Image (cartoon, rainbow, N blue to C red):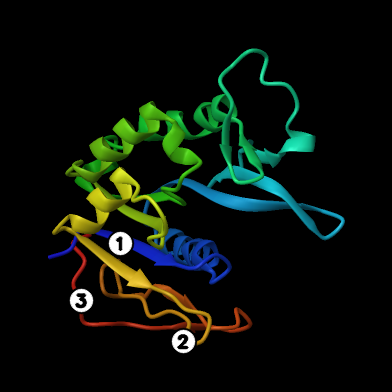
């Protein structure tokens, strides 16, 4: 029986879009959802960075290209490619969300969104600890995203991949997504087609313990 669901695939395949649609379906069915997404920030059609956005709409800066990043004020600078990671901003938004992981009401399981466990987020040691604790929480199911393997393995990502209670679904630009039902079997999760232009419901026979 699987407890957590993670999506993976190349950049631009729609991982965040699928997670957002799934959360809409879960919340409409009365399931408690917390956590955060990572969203692109564009200016004049150009991607200039990423923000972290909670499911309730709170937003903070995750990274910006170097010429827009501003001063690090003497802090160690963390970079991924051309992006400078704003670690304090990320932690200020993301870390408080984990404090409510064990507070599900009436013994019901909560869904916690982590989009994503990637290079930028993994500069934060408190984030790494919080993710591990959430993976082991008896009252929480994670709906998350992880990057495809590329270059040096990311330790926490490999931990997620190796867990027996995690089901990983891989999306592709040609084939889109197929996702299981992780609710109470009344409403399926929502899949997004390969081109992102259409949405369909889909149920698979994998059981997710929710």
Q: For the point 32% across and 50% down, which residue is it?
A: 157
User: In the figure, is residue 14 to the left or right of 2?
Assistant: right
Q: CA distance from mark 1 to mark 3?
A: 11 Å
Q: Secondary structure at mark 3?
A: loop
Q: Residue furthest right?
A: 44
Picture quarter containing residue 181?
Answer: bottom left
Neighbor class of circle 1 (other Cα within 10 Å; few <14, some 14-19, many 20+) is many
Seen at 49% across and 84% down, the residue is 200
Q: Looking at the image, is mark 1 or mark 2 nearer the viewer?
A: 2
Q: Nearer the viewer, residue 185 or 182?
A: 182
Mark nearer the N terminus (1 vs 2): 1
Residue 131, relative to residue 169: is it above or below?
above
The residue pinned by badge 2 equals: 175
Where is residue 33 shown, x and y percent of the image?
A: 41, 50
Is residue 109 among what the camera can see?
no
Instruction: Give the residue drawn at x 18%, y 63%.
Output: 2
The span from disc 1 to disc 2 (Cα, nearest Å) is 19 Å
Q: Residue beneath label 3, please?
A: 206
What's the CA distance linking mark 3 and mark 2? 19 Å
Q: Is residue 176 above or below residue 14?
A: below
Q: Which mark is residue 154?
A: none
Relative to 68, 14 lies left or right: left
Residue 27 in sight from this viewpoint = yes
Q: Which residue is mark 1?
A: 5
Which quadrant would the C terminus be assigned to in this image? bottom left
């Amino acid at each position: 029986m699987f407890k957590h669901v993670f999506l993976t695939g190349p950049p631009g395949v729609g991982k965040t879009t699928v997670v957002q649609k799934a959360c809409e379906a879960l919340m409409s069915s009365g399931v408690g959802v917390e956590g955060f997404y990572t969203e692109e920030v564009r200016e004049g059609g150009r991607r200039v960075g990423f923000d972290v956005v909670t499911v309730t709409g709170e937003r903070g800066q995750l990274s910006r290209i170097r010429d827009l990043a501003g001063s690090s004020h003497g802090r160690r600078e963390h970079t991924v490619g051309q992006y400078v990671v704003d670690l304090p901003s990320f932690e200020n938004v993301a870390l408080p969300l984990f404090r409510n992981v064990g507070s599900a009401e009436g013994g019901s399981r909560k869904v916690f969104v982590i989009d994503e466990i990637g290079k930028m987020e993994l500069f934060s040691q408190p984030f790494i600890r919080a993710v591990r604790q959430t993976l082991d929480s008896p009252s929480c199911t994670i709906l998350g995203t992880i990057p495809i393997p590329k270059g040096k393995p990311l330790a926490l990502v490999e931990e997620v991949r190796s867990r027996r209670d995690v089901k990983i679904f891989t999306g592709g630009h040609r084939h889109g997504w197929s996702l299981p039902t992780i609710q109470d079997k009344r409403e399926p999760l929502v899949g997004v087609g390969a081109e992102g232009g259409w949405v369909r419901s889909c149920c698979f026979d994998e059981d997710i313990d929710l």
